Image (tube, rainbow, N blue to C red):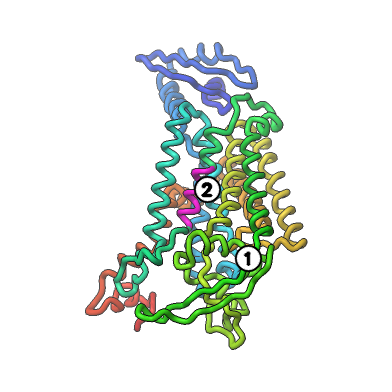
Amino acid sequence: MGSYQLIKENINPEALNLQGNKCTLRIEARERGDDVESALSKLNSPSSPRLCRNAASRCMSSASGTTRLVSLDVFRGLTVVLMILVDNAGGIFPAINHSPWNGLTLADFVMPFFLFMVGVSLGLAYKNLTCRGAASKKAMFRALKLLTLGVFLQGGYFHGINNLTYGVDMYQIRWTGILQRIAIAYFLAAACEIWLRSDDKVNSELSMLKKYQKQWVVVLMLTALYLLLLYGLYVPDWEYQIPIDASSSGKMYSVKCGVRGDTGPACNSVGMIDRKILGIHHLYRRPIYARTKQCSINSPDYGPLPPDAPSWCQAPFDPEGLLSTVMATVSCLIGLHYGHVIVHFKDHKTRLLQWLVPSCCLVALAVICDICGMHINKVLYSFSYMCFTTGAAGILFAAIYVMVDVYGYRRFTLVLEWMGMHALMIFILVACNIVPLILQGFYWSQPHNNILTSIGIGTRR
């Protein structure tokens, strides 16, 4: 097969037509000046029909853009496993659960890893873009589907699965969530990839940066916007109310702020923007900072309030809010750059160099920022958090790429590959409580006497 240059990565097949025992291949040689005529002449040998069919399958797959990067599926599957682990074991081992505020735990890598992979996938999906208008409509439709699905699954509709009740008060529905954040980041990154790239040929690292320079301008603009709003907005005093039951208004709490540039739980501009635009009734009602030492005697787990707990401990706060989603989109756009490396560079060493150098620089920058006071914080999706998690994603992706796509070790990654190809389905079934909802629907006499409690999962009342 060494003589068939048509199936090497550095050949771009345009068309392949088979007629009986004859096959004609039209190819465009790239970069290395391959001998196209020699490759064509050898296809007329007696054994060519079978070889041509094999080549045809690979060529048509490449031409249609359906070729999958195995390491990307494995990485996605590994992240799904990590998500399931921290969701189910985080309550037992709070140390691996999301950090209550500043700091980084195992669970805090899940969201940026998914966003990073969305960007890489977009770089591969739009490498042969033909119609920008049609691509934009398709991207918008996919984003709307994710948004709608996210509101339905994470907006509070399945609020009482233990009691087999459902439905959501529109006055209190949660508009933001994990799928909604992914949808926004996906659409913005897709729009950049569709409209903000030139037609220049890429033959070096510098020429690739020039081709996508407008996308890097967007990255800088989003980062500047986030930092300007986070550290520049004035946060006034505010108040909130915790209803005791449906018929009473509940107790009113006041939070003293009157500061600018604060990144603590009570007086940051991320929460203020969500309260002003979305409304405090539409925010996540179990704030992550309720697990801090100020708010829980069982910290880093949830627990009763300490006697001297501050007034903000029970205030709603959304971990997937509006301003933090701005910086989350940057993670997706950096992942898009890693996808560009796959498209434009075919040599393994070049790819690894293009991935590892910026990844290590991002991690180093994050550590420096954290030391200087710009702390790593998942809830705020701080700049240092974005740098560290995106850099870690790039390093892990490069390692998986070496193992799977370079050396071909796939025997032990088949399950992860399958999970990566069905990540959205697994997320909906497991992380959105659809599986528990189904299993708890089969019960004896009372809803709490169900299949899960009978095998020791869940709490009998």
**10 Å crowding of disc 1: few (<14), some (14-19), many (20+):** many
Does residue 106 show up magenta in the picture?
no
Q: Position of residue 390 (x, y in %)?
A: 63, 51
Is residue 453 at least partly visible in the picture? yes
For the record, the magenta segment spans: 178-188
Reply above or below: 94 against 61: below
Q: Position of residue 422 (x, y in %)?
A: 42, 50
Q: Which mark is residue 185?
A: 2
Type of amino acid at the residue the image marks with label 2 = Ala
Query: In the image, what residue occupies the spot 72% across and 44% down?
Result: 357
Which residue does the numbered mark 1 point to in the structure image? 235
Query: In the image, what residue occupies the spot 61% across and 31% down?
Result: 344
Reply above or below: 83 against 423: below
Reply above or below: 413 against 239: above
Q: Position of residue 263 (x, y in %)?
A: 66, 65
Foreground label between 1 and 2: 1
Q: Tell whether 258 sits left or right of 252.
A: right
Query: In the image, what residue occupies the spot 54% across and 47% down?
Result: 117
List the single residue furthest toward the bottom.
Answer: 307
Q: Nearer the viewer, residue 402 or 246?
A: 246
Q: Secondary structure at mark 2?
A: helix
Quadrant (top left/top right/bottom left/bottom right) for the C terminus: bottom left
Type of amino acid at the residue the image marks with label 1 = Val
**Which badge, 1 or 2, is on the more N-terminal residue?**
2
Q: Tell whether 82 sits left or right of 223.
A: left
